[in-house]
Amino acid sequence: MSSQRDMLGRPLTAMELELLEVHTRLQRLAARGDLPPCVAAGTQAALGLSWQMANDLGLDVTGPDA
């Protein structure tokens, strides 16, 4: 997902690294097949929002449908 640099080649800040960690954890959670429908829907919504934040910061993340 990330090579410790943003799309412009700048080193990632602590906040950016934390955001990428949250996004990765949401991806793992979304991939589970045992989530109740409300948790699955909330996870998908949160994943889309975390993707948008990372994308706006120029961080290399996969799309929200990945």
Image (tube, helix red, strand yellow):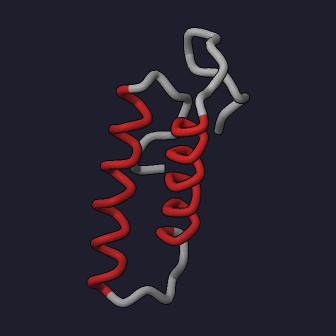
Residue drawn where x is 29% and y is 71% of the image: 42
- Looking at the image, residue 1 sits to the left or right of residue 48; the answer is right
- Looking at the image, residue 18 sits to the left or right of residue 39; the answer is right
Up-down: is 35 above or below 32? below
- Farthest residue, direction right: 3
Foreground residue among 2 and 34: 2
Up-down: is 43 above or below 20? below
Residue 50 location (% of width, % of height): 39, 48
Q: Quadrant of the N terminus?
A: top right
Up-down: is 18 above or below 34? above
Residue drawn where x is 50% and y is 45% of the image: 19
Residue 10 location (% of width, % of height): 62, 13
Residue drawn where x is 55% and y is 29% of the image: 60
Residue 31 location (% of width, % of height): 53, 69
Residue 20 location (% of width, % of height): 55, 44
- Looking at the image, residue 8 sits to the left or right of residue 43; the answer is right
Residue drawn where x is 46% and y is 22% of the image: 58
| Count of marks placed on residues | 0
- Farthest residue, direction top: 8
